[in-house]
Every structure is written in structure tokens, then in C-alpha cells.
Image: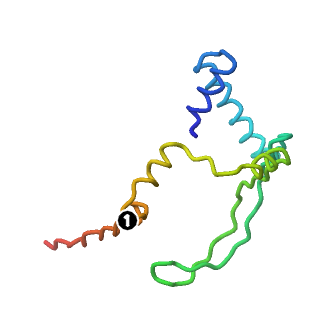
Amino acid sequence: MTKKEIVKQISDRIGLTQLKTKDIVQQTFDAIVETLLEVGRIELRNFGVFEVKQRKARKARNPRTGDPVEVPPKFVVTFKPGKEMENRVRKMTHPAFSSQTEARTTESTNGLDERATHKPRKKPSRVRKTS
């Protein structure tokens, strides 16, 4: 679901124009981001908790060359769902997919997702011109 679809759904429910609803939704998102930047945590009852945490520096590998790479520490946003959301998701009997996602996965070749059957293209090698 996109922000545009959320705006349409909310505007249909409460009877505001989509333009006003879009502004309200955007202001809400902006307030969440600003709170995370200033305080580092925002708790929305019955929804969940957003929190800024710092990941430690670590060693990783370049998948292409296998060389070790140092990854510096960085800040990330984490989300822990509230009890009500957690309970409602647990009671789901099947995953909810959009019709676009279902259409992509049902269009298959020999029972496999069409994207999985394509081989990646090789990038053309570049030839340097020397003058």
C-alpha cells in the first residue's frame, strides 16, 4: 500500500478532500521523524514503538571480491509492534497481498516466478579509446 492509497482510504472514511487528508498524513509522518531525530523514541499506543538505535561497527565481506570490509557504526530506526497489532497479525489465516503482487507471482513459467527464470544480463565491457 502506498501513501496515496492510505490518503484515499482515510479521506473516504472521514469525508475530507484528498488534498487536506494528504497534508494531515504528511504532517503526521513529519512529526514522527522529527520526534525520532530530537528524542530518539516515539511510542504510539496500540500501534507500536519506533526507536533510534546505533548499530556497532562490524566486519563484512565484499560479495564480489571476497575482501574484508569495515562497516562503520550507524544509526537505524527500529519498530516494535504493539500488543494489539501483534495479536491481530497472529490471527491472520493467510497473508494479505495486493492484487499487483498476486498478479506478478501467478504469472509464472513452469510453476516458477517469471523473474526467477531470467538470467541476469551481463554488462557490456567498456573499451577505452586511446588517442
Q: Residue at x 74, y 35 (%)?
A: 31
Q: Residue furthest left?
A: 131
The count of marks equals 1
Q: Is residue 2 above or below residue 79?
A: above
Amino acid carrying mark 1 in the image: Asn
Question: Looking at this view, is 112 or 67 the one in front?
Answer: 112
Position of residue 69 in the picture relative to residue 105 (left or right): right
Q: Residue at x 57, y 32 (%)?
A: 5
> Looking at the rendering, in which quadrant would you find the N terminus?
top right
Q: Is residue 70 above or below residue 106?
A: below
The location of residue 128, given as percent across then percent down, is 21, 72
> Looking at the rendering, in which quadrant would you find the C terminus?
bottom left
How packed mark 1 is, by other alpha carbons closer than 10 Å (few <14, some 14-19, many 20 or more), is few
- The reply to whether residue 40 is visible in this rendering is no
Q: Residue at x 42, y 64 (%)?
A: 111
The location of residue 75, given as percent across then percent down, is 71, 59
The location of residue 8, given as percent across then percent down, is 59, 26
Question: Looking at this view, is 38 or 85 the one in front?
Answer: 85
Position of residue 90 in the picture relative to residue 10 (left or right): right
The location of residue 88, given as percent across then percent down, is 78, 46
Q: Which residue position holds label 1?
A: 110
Question: Looking at this view, is 124 or 68 the one in front?
Answer: 124
Position of residue 127 in the picture relative to residue 70 (left or right): left
Rendering quarter of residue 52 = bottom right
